[in-house]
Image (spheres, rainbow, N blue to C red):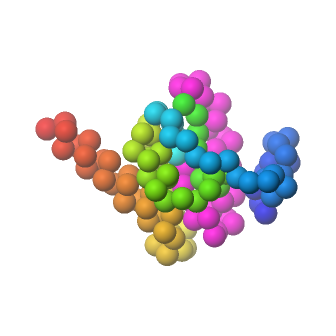
Amino acid sequence: RFEDVVGQVLGEPPISKQPSLPKMSANCGMLVISSDPGDEEATAAALILEAKLKDDFVSMTDAGICCMTHRQQDPLLLMDCIAQSRAVVILLSARTLQSVVQLAAIVEAVGQLHEDSTQAM
């Protein structure tokens, strides 16, 4: 998988050889990056974006980045992460509207935006 190639370039062990993907944990203030788990190009874009943003984001907060390509694709846990996030990036691709994970991310992000704007009034 492309994730393994990116990991090798960054000097990390291949993900496919690890026994299981790390579970998500919702850290208040983190950046969440979501992409269609079935789309290799979207995965590549998400990993490149994470690599480019990591140093700058970590200098602002120690909450870190939750890139969904590294996590188990559980929509409920994703929604919890988004609810506590500082920012959300949802990478759109050809099958985004067919992906339960992507739809859950979109619905939760829009819901949080609506909730925040309602509280501000």
Image location (x, y in percent) of residue 74 = 54, 59
Residue 86 vs 48, above or below: the answer is: above
Instruction: Give me the residue at 79% from left, 54% from top.
Output: 19
Q: Is residue 57 magenta?
A: yes
- Foreground residue, 15 or 53? 15
- Foreground residue, 83 or 113? 83
Residue 34 vs 115, above or below: the answer is: below
Q: Quadrant of the C terminus?
A: top left
Asked whether residue 63 is in view, the answer is yes
Magenta: main secondary structure: helix
Image location (x, y in percent) of residue 25 = 55, 41
Magenta residues span 33-62
Image location (x, y in percent) of residue 29 = 46, 33
Residue 59 vs 106, above or below: the answer is: above
User: Is 14 on the left-hand or right-hand side of 71?
Assistant: right
- Foreground residue, 48 or 23? 23
